Amino acid sequence: MAATAREEGASGEERGQRGCEHYDRGCLLKAPCCDKLYTCRLCHDNNEDHQLDRFKVKEVQCINCEKIQHAQQTCEECSTLFGEYYCDICHLFDKDKKQYHCENCGICRIGPKEDFFHCLKCNLCLAMNLQGRHKCIENVSRQNCPICLEDIHTSRVVAHVLPCGHLLHRTCYEEMLKEGYRCPLCMHSALDMTRYWRQLDDEVAQTPMPSEYQNMTVDILCNDCNGRSTVQFHILGMKCKICESYNTAQAGGRRISLDQQ
């Protein structure tokens, strides 16, 4: 939904059409970079070879009367409500989703505000139930999602906080679980695997190794607690002696026969 300001206009089918696939709003943004009219910055960025700086937007065009005016919540000409929610910093217009502007994040977040807190070290708004219960990684949201390699901090997709403290887009996290259970950055278990580990205990107990392997040990490194231990080798998995996780890897030590010690 783009048009050069007043050259093509928002006419025909576009006129009066409210919002886009991203936002519900009653105005078009006049991009300060190219003077074109777009419903939102995402529509602009999808169609141009540059990005729209939301903070530099000064003018909008009403979708009903087409008057270009200073960015504000209501049309000064026909009183059309541009957005139930409006932020005069981000110039975000949308229906009410309990949004709030976080000064530390520098952008608007979907609330309610009282359900979130801003972690100064992670530099991110997190759910209140994670306060004091998450692993902090400095400026973690400024890193791209390790699965899709796209931005997390300003993404409209909810971020999922892994136990290790790393972030993934929620949709990327759900796709990842179809293929595996470990963080793609540090290999830590991405969810509570306790029940599965106990099931694996039973499977290991019911699956004796061939005689030539029964007295073999191997050095392992645990991806969950980072501990090292020497355990009996088993094809189904090797359990960490420290935290009882099976999320382990051989640490390079050769297998040693117990009867040779």
Image (tube, rainbow, N blue to C red):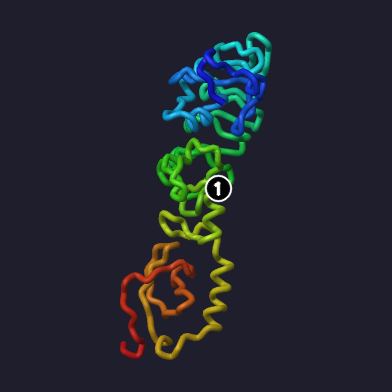
Q: Which quadrant of the figure contains the C terminus?
A: bottom left
Q: Answer with left or right where residue 218 lies relative to residue 167.
A: left
The residue furthest top is: 77
Q: Is residue 113 visible?
A: no
Task: Name the residue at 46% across, 56% down.
Answer: 183
- Within 10 Å of disc 1 (Cα), the crowding (few <14, some 14-19, many 20+) is some
Task: Name the residue at 49% across, 48% down.
Answer: 168
Quarter-wise, where is residue 201 in the image? bottom right
Task: Name the residue at 38% across, 84% down.
Answer: 216
> Is label 1 in a helix, a strand or a loop?
helix
Question: Is 2 or 60 nearer to us in this picture?
Answer: 2
Q: Is residue 36 visible?
A: yes
Q: Position of residue 157 (x, y in %)?
A: 55, 41
149 w.r.t. 92: above or below: below
Task: Name the residue at 36% across, 74% down.
Answer: 219
Q: Position of residue 21 (x, y in %)?
A: 61, 33
249 w.r.t. 44: above or below: below
237 w.r.t. 72: above or below: below
Image label count: 1
Q: Answer with left or right where residue 51 lies relative to residue 93.
A: left
Q: Position of residue 9 (x, y in %)?
A: 57, 16
Q: Which quadrant of the figure contains the N terminus?
A: top right
Q: Position of residue 172 (x, y in %)?
A: 52, 50
155 w.r.t. 252: above or below: above
Given the image, on which type of amino acid does mark 1 rest? Arg
Quarter-wise, where is residue 251 in the image? bottom left
* Residue, disc 1: 170
